[in-house]
């Protein structure tokens, strides 16, 4: 698990630069196609849950529209109040609309859905449940663009979602169902 965390953290700080789109004047409003690759961290908290996720993310822009996809890994510290622990992987997709785009920042609002494939273990490490959960959410934030070339970015965001359990095997746990407050930050490179 520690190796997975180190690899994910390195992906957060270093992005792959294999192909670059024409950047034009550096703003999305010129009609240029811009895409981003980077890492992200999310903290989810709810009625009976505290969860830390880290992952990689792709964003594609066209004018004020932004479609994004990502893969998230549970950092292994997710706990419910009854002491059970969760681990797993998540896949997310979303849409953001830019309210104001400029050379140094973008205010946005959007929606995102994350599918989580989780395993729960009790205090003794015995697996008690496998489940699939979907978390649709709304989010808002601001993207900061750095440097004279405008290629490095960081994006803090906040959101509100609701976790819905699709299926589960084993002993049921209610820890991951219900409303969630989600804070996050992503950073990476714009092409």
Image (cartoon, grey):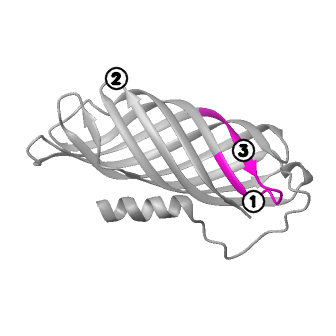
Q: Secondary structure at mark 2?
A: loop
Disc on the earlier residue, 3 or 2: 2
Verify CB contact (< 8 Å) between mark 3 and mark 1.
Answer: no
Q: Residue at x 46, y 59 (%)?
A: 9
- Percent x, y of residue 130: 23, 48
In the picture, the quarter occupied by the C terminus is: bottom right
Residue 105: quarter of image: top right
Q: Residue at x 70, y 43 (%)?
A: 143
Q: Nearer the viewer, mark 2 or mark 1?
A: 1
For the view shown, which residue lies furthest in the bottom direction? 18
| Nearer-the-camera pick, 126 or 25 | 25
Q: Which label belongs to residue 47?
A: 2
Measured in 3D between alpha carbons, the distance from the residue under mark 2 to the one under mark 1, in whole angstroms, is: 39 Å
Q: Nearer the viewer, mark 3 or mark 2?
A: 3
Q: Residue at x 79, y 69 (%)?
A: 21
Rendered position, 114 above or below 46? below
Measured in 3D between alpha carbons, the distance from the residue under mark 3 to the one under mark 1, in whole angstroms, is: 10 Å
Disc on the earlier residue, 3 or 1: 3
- Percent x, y of residue 42: 47, 42
- Where is mark 3, residue-wise? 144
- Percent x, y of residue 189: 67, 60
Q: Secondary structure at mark 3?
A: strand
> Is residue 107 magenta-colored?
no
Q: Residue at x 35, y 63 (%)?
A: 4
Magenta residues, as a range? 139-154
- Where is mark 1, residue-wise? 151
Could you tell me what secondary structure mostly forms the magenta stretch?
strand
């Amino acid at each position: 698990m520690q190796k997975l965390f180190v690899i994910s953290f390195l992906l957060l700080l270093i992005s792959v630069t294999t192909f670059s789109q024409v950047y034009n004047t550096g703003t999305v409003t010129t009609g240029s196609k811009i895409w981003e690759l980077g890492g992200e961290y999310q903290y989810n908290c709810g009625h009976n849950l505290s969860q830390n996720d880290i992952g990689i993310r792709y964003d594609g822009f066209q004018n004020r529209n932004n479609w994004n996809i990502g893969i998230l890994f549970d950092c292994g510290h997710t706990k419910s109040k009854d002491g059970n622990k969760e681990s797993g992987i998540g896949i997310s997709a979303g849409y953001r609309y830019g309210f104001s785009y400029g050379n140094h920042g973008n205010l946005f609002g959007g929606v995102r859905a994350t599918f989580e494939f989780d395993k729960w273990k009790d205090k003794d490490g015995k697996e008690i449940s496998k489940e699939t959960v979907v978390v649709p959410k709304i989010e808002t934030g601001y993207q900061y663009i750095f440097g004279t070339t405008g290629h490095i970015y960081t994006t803090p965001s906040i959101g509100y979602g609701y976790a819905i359990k699709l299926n589960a095997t084993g002993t049921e746990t209610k820890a991951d169902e219900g409303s969630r407050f989600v804070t996050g930050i992503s950073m990476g490179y714009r092409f």
